């Protein structure tokens, strides 16, 4: 069974940092583009970033460029999202996605003082 | 950035009826790389359609996608109670993916 499990979310103060992780199982992780998508409370979906199979190509939504970094470790079957200079508007559930599907259950990031 | 506009914002229908959801792009979507998702409260989105018209694995044939270029449609025929949810379109043909704002399908 294909499974994606996110972790690392929590409460952080504005300006702080956090590292999200996504551990994959049930498929050959190194063969897939991976994506982070977020959803603010009560709002729609927002694509955040994606990374190609070997980590050489990375793309970001403009609102997070220079603050967030996507990376992966194929040996550990893991995807990461480093969040820095966090703002209140970054508060959201962050989902890890294999390509278009499936999605993990998400991890909540709350930015508040 | 390609902006996706979904309409209507809310659609009220009864079980057994058909639903037509629209997704319009601000510029042509490359290779019709357009997907549709269903999301229920407290759950992650589920992929329904990819490539504008291909059903994902396990999706009933009452869900169908059509369109090309800038205009896309998700049609749900014979609505079942479990179909009432929020639906999102996504384009993945450019360097930055984008989602539409969503259509809420509610029971009338």
Image (cartoon, coloured by chain):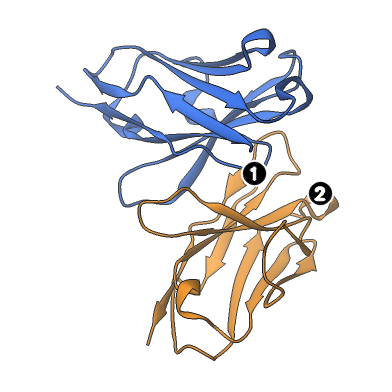
Quick check: can you spot residue B26? no
Residue at point 40%, 77% (across, down) = B106
Could you say which disc has been placed on residue B30 in the image?
2
Q: Looking at the rendering, in which quadrant would you find the C terminus of chain B?
A: bottom left
Tag 1 secondary structure:
loop
Q: Evaluate whether label 2 is on the same chain as label 1.
A: no
Q: Is residue B57 above or below residue A67?
A: below
Q: Secondary structure at mark 2?
A: helix
Residue farthest along the left direction in this orientation: A113
Position of the N terminus of chain B, as image quadrant, is top right
Q: Position of residue A66 (x, y in %)?
A: 50, 14
Q: Residue A64 placed where, x, y %?
A: 48, 24
- Residue drawn at x 56%, y 61% is B5
Quarter of the image where one finds residue A84: top left
Frontmost residue, A57 versus A6: A6
Going by the picture, which residue comes out furthest to the front? A1
Q: Is residue A59 depicted above or below B52 in this figure?
A: above
Q: CA distance from mark 2 to mark 1?
A: 20 Å
- The image shows residue A62, relative to residue B102, as above or below, that is above
**Residue B13 image point, x, y percent:** 45, 87
Residue depth check, mark 2 versus mark 1: number of the one nearer the observer: 1
Is residue A102 in view from this perspective?
Answer: yes
How many numbered marks have been drawn onto this rendered protein structure? Answer: 2
Rendered shade, chain A: blue
Say left or right for A92 vs B11. left
Q: Position of residue B39 (x, y in %)?
A: 47, 58
Check disc 2: other Cα within 10 Å, few if <14, some if 14-19, many if 20+.
Answer: some
Residue placed under numbered mark 1 in the picture = A101
Q: Quadrant of residue A23?
A: top right
Q: Using the image, name the chain to which the residue with label 1 belongs.
A: A
Give the colour chain B carries in the figure. orange
């Amino acid at each position: 069974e294909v499974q994606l499990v996110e972790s690392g979310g929590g409460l952080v103060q504005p300006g702080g940092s956090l590292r999200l992780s996504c551990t994959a199982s049930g498929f050959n992780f190194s063969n897939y583009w991976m994506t982070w998508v977020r959803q603010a409370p009560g709002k729609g979906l927002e694509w955040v970033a994606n990374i190609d199979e070997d980590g050489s190509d990375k793309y970001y939504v403009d609102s997070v460029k220079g603050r967030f970094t996507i990376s992966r470790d194929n040996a550990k079957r893991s995807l990461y999202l480093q969040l820095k200079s966090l703002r209140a508007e970054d508060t959201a559930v962050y989902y890890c996605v294999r390509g278009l599907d499936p999605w993990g259950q998400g991890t909540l990031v709350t930015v508040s003082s | 950035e390609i902006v996706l506009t979904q309409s209507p914002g809310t659609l009220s229908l009864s079980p057994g009826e058909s639903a037509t959801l629209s997704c319009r792009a601000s510029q042509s979507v490359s290779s019709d790389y357009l997907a549709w998702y269903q999301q229920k409260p407290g759950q992650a989105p589920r992929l329904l359609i990819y490539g504008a018209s291909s059903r994902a694995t396990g999706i009933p044939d009452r869900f169908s996608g059509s369109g090309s270029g800038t205009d896309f449609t998700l049609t749900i025929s014979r609505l079942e109670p479990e179909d009432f949810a929020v639906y999102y379109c996504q384009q993945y043909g450019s360097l930055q993916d984008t989602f539409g704002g969503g259509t809420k399908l509610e029971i009338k």
